[in-house]
Image: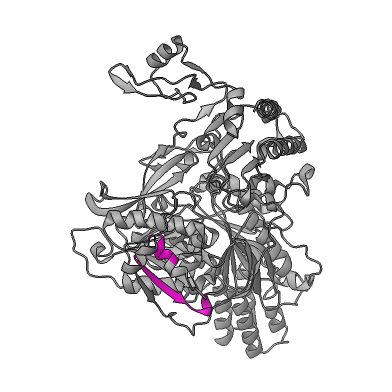
Amino acid sequence: MLIIALVKGVPSRSSKVVRVDNIVQRQQMEMIVNPNDEKAIEAADYLKRRVGGKIVTLSMGPDVRLKPVLLPLYSAEATGVDEEMILSDPRLAGSDTVATSYAVGLAVFKIYEKHVTPFDVLIRLISDGASMQEVEAKARELYDQNVLPNKVYNKEPGDRNSIVGHFVDGNLSRDEVVARLKTERTNATKFIIVAGIRTSDGETGSVGPQVAEVVSQKMGIEIPHATYVEELDVDPDSLRVHAGRRIGRSMQRLEMEAPVLMTFAPEYVPRTIQSVDFSRVIENYYKGKITEPIKWTADVLDANPARLGFGGSAVIVGPAIQMEAPTGQKTVDKSLVFTKRVERTTSEGKEFGPFEKGDTADALPQGLKDDLMSRGALTTFSLKMLGEELLA
Amino acid sequence: MTTTTTPVAPTTSAVVALADYKDVWVFLQRQDRHLSSDSLELLASGRKVADQVGQKLVGLVLGSNLRGLPEEAIDYGADTVLVVDDPALRTYHTLRIIDTVEAMILKRKPYAIIFLATEFGREIAARLAYRVNSGLATDNVDFEVQDYFNPKFNEMFPKTMTQVRPDFGSRVAKIWTPRHRPQVATLKPGSFSPLARDANRRARAKIEKVPLPRPGKTYAVTVKELVELPKPSVDLEHANVVIGLGMGILHRADGSPKNPLEAYMLATELKDLIERKWGLKTEIGASRELVMARVKALEGIITRDHELGQTGTLISPDLYIALGVSGSAPHRAGIRAKKILAVNPDPDAHIHLAAQYSVVGDLYEFVPKLIDTLEAVADKA
């Protein structure tokens, strides 16, 4: 089973936000894997242990910055990630959620295509009457590229327990091989996309459902999505996905046909696998890990350039404004408050007041505060005063 | 999915004929037999936009067995209610609902559509925005309709919705969707107050029943069940005073570790005092972060039932005492207290931005002193 995990590099919480022309300059900020994505990796790992297959992560952003944060994922949990794709292109800068989802969704489609076309190549070769040597050479080549599972080809010496192996040994006819490859091709189309519920920098939580929509439109089918997933299981035979998620005070339990996209809530904890068919899991594994992240530019996407990056974005973000504490906030041992009622007063040509006992004077000009202080009208807000006001 | 686009004058960068899109839609959600309280806030936000743009406010009520809900929507601000009442919509089937709203949008072309920033509202808004080829602004706290000039397109976009949302913590950003329609947004619960209920509005309002589009369509997803979770063991919802514990209880202000059970004991002491001397129902809650951390010392004491904030129990007490709570945006969104007392050694903690009373200091020093002070205040009274 192909499992595609969307992973985002985000600025670490301690990092200062750098912007140029109001575009966040992620390359200038310390980067970490989006904390919510860890649950997606755990879910991917669970699926891989349960059914077999491979985990491919997909990230978008400057590859130089992303590589160091993505590398540790190869050894994450028990089985870890098998391949990492980084979509890195200046043309993608300034993307809003729609433009991001468009690029990510097309890249997901490319990953899917990469794992399905090998079946088509083999089926065509065999149907066209290619020799067993040719078929085996092609299968080995694709296997070495990590795009065919052990079940289809396995080049361990003496191990003929694969579809192509049986064919080469004469155990399967051409028609039988084609039929079995077609079945495996169908299984390969049942991939699963996993992601975190939202990123810690954008916090929109929109990209997951939108990617499901982009991939749906690209494939011409309707891929279901489920967000905030807390419970997950998959039937290794039918590849049907069972997911539970909270909606308000209810738990909704879904059954979905893959392909499917899910985002995982922090509450998600992988189930304990009681028993597993190891031979099936191993048959579904691929050759191994490609431990150097692969960089893709927007060129591989066959995208409409008008829909990428800032130009393809529908929303425009204005400058950020610092939020202020509520007026009248009182800080214990710091705020100055009135000790008595003070009538309307003028300071430097402006009018202030009237003030009631207990009102804060923090926002008043310094000159006025000094004046009020000298008249004994102000005092520091104390714990005792807090105690008197709190439950009054 | 493509929208049918009307030819657009070449002088504009807009992707659709903006003037064709009219009325402000709000996607309402129910809680048992009524509209949810968040939905009443949503109506208030939509009313503001509709009035500013000079158009109608349209409430969408989708589901099954919706008796009374459309009238409620009108009482709280809607001019028109579009009702899709069908058993197929009973179980929060996301794709079914997206299909339904999409069909309505393509037919009627609204100026804007606003959802609640709940688990459910978010995913519908996101996927739908992509389907109808528009943009999305999430978690807004305010809306304002203004003429918007964009220097990049060198173009004035008349009567555009300015969407205000939190940005990187303690700041807010303004967001526009000038070239696309409808403008799709989500509203952060707690940002608006519901309008006063006015049953007289019904005389001028209209309720329109809309059939379910493509009723025979099958989906690759089935809702197997929708089960109500047991009521939380802690009645945070009806408490007059809520004491919230956050990750800050794991440390002293100087960063040295502390057994968080001590903070819980202090909170309990404070709770008992307030209940005994003031007779106010008081409960202890916790931030999502603390609940999720599954701290060993608090096992069975702080559970998911205690969770405050957007994904936990929404509270509206008279007083919220936040102990060691950082006050992330989702946390604050779930708190509608009349007064907040924030105790956190970090002066930049966001909770201080929401608090009427702020204590920059160590809760382990402060709470015992507060207890003594309150004892003295109560004895004097």
Residue A100 visible somewhere in the drawing? no
Please give left or right for residue A65 compared with residue A281 in the image. Answer: left
Q: Image height check: is A261 above or below B261? A: below
> What is the x, y in percent for residue B119?
55, 59
Q: Is residue B72 left or right of residue B289?
A: left
Q: Quadrant of the N terminus of chain A?
A: bottom right
Q: Which residues are magenta?
A: B72-89
Residue B303 at x, y percent in the picture: 72, 50
Q: Nearer the viewer, residue B254 or B311?
A: B311
Image point (57%, 70%), residue name: A260
The part of the image, by quadrant, that contains residue A237 is bottom right
**Residue at the extreme right of the image, as rendered:** A275
Q: Position of residue B49 (x, y in %)?
A: 33, 55
- Residue A336 falls within the magenta-colored stretch: no
Left or right: where A371 falls relative to B336: left
**Above or below: residue B185 compared with residue A254:** above
Please check the rendered image and state whether residue B88 is part of the magenta-colored stretch, yes or no. yes
Judged from this view, the residue extending furthest toward the top is A374
Choose top left, top right, bottom left or bottom right for residue A112: bottom right
Residue located at (47% from left, 83% from top): B215
Q: Position of residue A392 (x, y in %)?
A: 58, 33
Residue B212 visible, this orientation:
yes
